[in-house]
Image (spheres, rainbow, N blue to C red):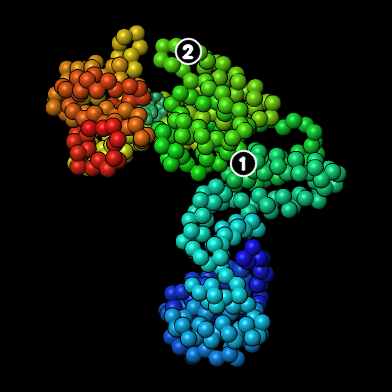
Amino acid sequence: MDYLPLFHNLKGRKCLVVGGGEIALRKVRPLLEAGAVVRVVAPQIRQSLKEMADVGTIQITVKTFHPDDMAGVALVIAATSDQQVNEQVSRFARERNIMVNVVDNPALCSVIFPAIIDRSPVQIAISTGGSAPVLARLLRGKLESLLPDAYGKLAQLADKFRPAVKAKLESENSRRGFWEKVFEGPIAELVFRGRMQEAEQALADAIDNPDVQACGEVYLVGGGPGDPDLLTFRALRLMQQADIVLYDRLVSKEVLNLVRRDAERIYVGKTAGDHPVTQENINRKLVEFALQGHRVLRLKGGDPFIFGRGGEEIEHLAEHGIPFQVVPGITAASGCASYAGIPLTHRDHAQSVRFIAGHRRDDDLNLPWEELAAPGQTLVFYMGLNGLETICHQLMTHGMDAATPAALIEKGTTARQRTFVGNLADLPEKVRLGEARAPTLIIVGHVVGLHHKLKWFGEQHGE
Ligand code: SAH
């Protein structure tokens, strides 16, 4: 181990920052956050530091550094661009056994600053030993995304109830099991949503009856159109903590791979015209698993509330008093449009956009064609591959120009994305020749004309 990570209590302690520029300012901030008494010494001081001194947040002495400035100091930071001064500060500090940090020069440091994730009282410090600070910052970004903002509140809650849990549960093992359930279950979710009072009540109840099997929770999560990078932070977090996953055909393999390794996975997808798992069955399973205390992930392609029957599923949960939360996902229209370089609205071409279910019921597409054929809007048809010819034909019959641009995007946002571009008259033939396969999305409107200029996603199999 190159360094021993320690968390330093600097409240009320004197810290000296040598240097008055931007780099000094960057060091002053975390010191103040940690409650240190900060003094800045430099012959020239930038305005933002002066303003801090004006309101009494820090002290400033305008002069060159002198070793006497270190009297009574717990930590000194050299943040000057003068190598000689930095070396001097380092040497004097070491002679006096004062902790010293020289910015961007690990060799002159006795302590180094980590990249910090602050969810006080929870804190994570990441260091590369000064060898690659950028890497530490990238790592921090990855971790930040997994830790909800209110993570610290969770620790505060645990702190408050720790004595009560200790009194109730004697063995260390049972206490550990108890806290694991709290930190990864519905109580933590309440905290993350800012519902502290309910969380406290639920925790108090759980302490009173630690053996009662608490009800689980259902997470109705939108998995987006395919590219796993399009998941939300919350979706990823819940995917990582669920015990059981019920997923659809449209959830991509790459997205499914991000579900917790040891979670049970149940495929409940429907193939067109054939319903191996009925909706009633899915609804029943969700309730059953939750009542058994499981954290159940209902993972859907795109957004659960857009042509996803998500509403029906949670209606059923609500009727049975099962706690649930809904996490939006990027719907196919947004995903495919972005990755095909087709803005869905545009000041010059379309002031509104409509999402339409384009699948045929009993061989008939019953849609308000007059309205759809009106100008100034973009039409997005989900589930429209089989009905493509009818869609184009009907729009033309109801007055839309045959030359209106139209596109069909196959497996949008994935490495297998293909975009077919044409107009109402020729798109069906192009798609037939290209043998497009579901899932596909159809976009009709003048915005499609921007595709050639705006396409950016290098399609491997495309035009
Ligand atoms: N809830 C989903 C839609 C479910 S309906 C969402 O919000 O995206 C299923 C239809 O979505 C498919 O028939 C297809 O039209 C569209 N779709 C979903 N993913 C797609 C993708 N990656 N590429 C193209 N179309 C997609």
Q: Residue at x 69, y 26 (%)?
A: 292
Q: Is residue 84 visible?
A: yes
Query: Which amino acid, mark 1?
Result: Glu
Rendered view: 362 above or below 404:
above
Task: Judge the density around disc 1: few (<14), some (14-19), many (≥20) Cα neighbours within 10 Å.
Answer: many
The answer to whether marks 1 and 2 mark residues whose Cβ atoms lie closer than 8 Å is no
Query: Which amino acid, mark 2?
Result: His
Q: Which residue is mark 1?
A: 189
Q: Is residue 356 visible?
A: no
- Residue 226 placed where, x, y %? 41, 33
Q: Which residue is mark 2?
A: 275
SS at badge 2: loop
* Quarter of the figure that contains the C terminus: top left
Q: Residue at x 13, y 27 (%)?
A: 403
Task: Judge the density around disc 2: few (<14), some (14-19), many (≥20) Cα neighbours within 10 Å.
Answer: few
Q: Residue at x 64, y 52 (%)?
A: 153
- Residue 188 placed where, x, y %? 64, 43
- Residue 249 placed where, x, y %? 45, 23
**Is 192 placed left or right of 175 in the picture?**
left
- Residue 221 placed where, x, y %? 51, 33
Q: Where in the image, quadrant-wise, is ligand 1 located?
A: top left
The residue closer to the viewer here, 89 or 41, is 89
